[in-house]
Image (cartoon, rainbow, N blue to C red):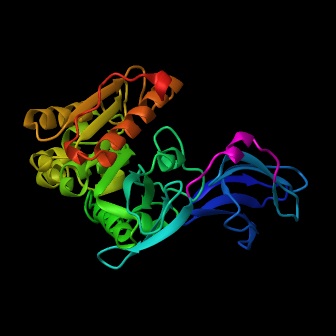
Amino acid sequence: HVEAFAWTESGELMYVAAEGVETVVGRVALEGSSHLRVKAGVAIFQSLSLAKNGAMALVGHTARHPGEVFYVAPEGEPKRLTDSNPWLKEKEFGEQTVVQWKAQDGLTLEGILIKPVHYQKGRRYPLILTVHGGPESHIPNGWLTRYAYPGQVGAARGFAIFYPNYRGSTGRGVAFSKLGHADAAGKEFSDLIDAVDHLVELGIVDRDRVGITGGSYGGYASAWGATYYSDRFAASVMFVGISDNVSKVGTTDIPEEMYLVHHRKRLWDDWEYFLERSPIRHVKKGHTPTLILHGKEDPRVHPSQSMELYRHLKTLGQAPVRLVFYPGEGHGNRRAASRFDYNVRMLRWMETFLQSPQGRKAKIPDFRIDYDRQ
């Protein structure tokens, strides 16, 4: 999966590519020969620029450093030039590792686990399963703390955090990225359950204290977890997610995506399939406390997707549910205030229903937030 590329003065192509959960930097000549310049494991590189003498500047991140600038001499090794957040040296981090597991059909999958800060072997912890969007995307083994990812902030609050690269993710070739094709919420989401079961078998996770969150397609997974797989998740935080595959096609700014990218069939070719793979079809199973967050101006996944799920869950009344809209935000939050609010609400929801003695029976937290105490 190529992340970035640039042409050299001599007509060679330099590229940054994802290989599994790592990245490499390589060179390809016009006649087809190739050479690896930077091996996997140095950093997760995202962009590059070239000098006329063949030197490279790269931007990359690691498990303990957000974006930093790296320099690679024409025949040298990468050297990090910047230290943009020196205060991080004073912070304690949860251990971050790559975990592999087997799906029910034998497929080997991998993801990134962040253990709680001060992790104690033999003790079981609440888990926040964080599902990437796309689904043509993947989570690399780099810096995984941001407004929509609990990361090290969640680890500092006593959670295990897991980022699964389920079938259909990028980074493992075209064939792998097509494994979820025409099977929305099928094996791709059963992979998530298999991942949780594996972490339980390892003795890390408490099976009864598992939450799920994600945005866009990850929000779709979170809605699916709150309905179809409600018995497995004690909390769900859905962000700009899909709840109704039928109405989604009629309200999105990319209506051909479902046909051209994911299914190769129209709604009218198989109405029952698209409805059956919609979380709203399974709301009667839902007894998972669910927080629904959405940008009010989202053109990609219309806010009505969140309204539909909220209305059905609220009417059924089988579990706490809350809907929060962010004015002026689209398919993802851009403003600092919206991002901060999102992160606070997400973690507070997980703390309430995964860490309190009452579990999923806990009282819903107050809608109001005292930001000065966060």
Q: Residue at x 71, y 72 (%)?
A: 32
Vertical placement of residue 161 versus 178, above or below: above
Q: Which residues are magenta?
A: 80-94
Vertical placement of residue 177 versus 337, above or below: below
Vertical placement of residue 296 versus 292, above or below: above
Q: Nearer the viewer, residue 308 or 36?
A: 308
Q: Main secondary structure of the magenta part?
A: loop
Q: Residue furthest right?
A: 53
Is residue 263 rendered to the left or right of residue 150? left
Q: Residue at x 27, y 47 (%)?
A: 357
Task: Determine the image quadrant of residue 201.
Answer: bottom left
Task: Give percent across and percent down for residue 284.
Answer: 9, 47
Task: Determine the image quadrant of residue 105.
Answer: bottom left
Numbered circles on residues, count: 0
Is residue 70 rendered to the left or right of residue 262? right
Q: Residue at x 83, y 63 (%)?
A: 77
Q: Nearer the viewer, residue 89 or 15?
A: 89
Residue 183 is one of the magenta-drawn residues: no
Q: Quadrant of the N terminus?
A: bottom right
Q: Residue at x 50, y 56 (%)?
A: 139
Task: Give percent across and percent down for residue 2.
Answer: 60, 58
Residue 86 is one of the magenta-drawn residues: yes
Task: Give percent across and percent down for residue 322.
Answer: 25, 31
Residue 257 visible? The answer is no
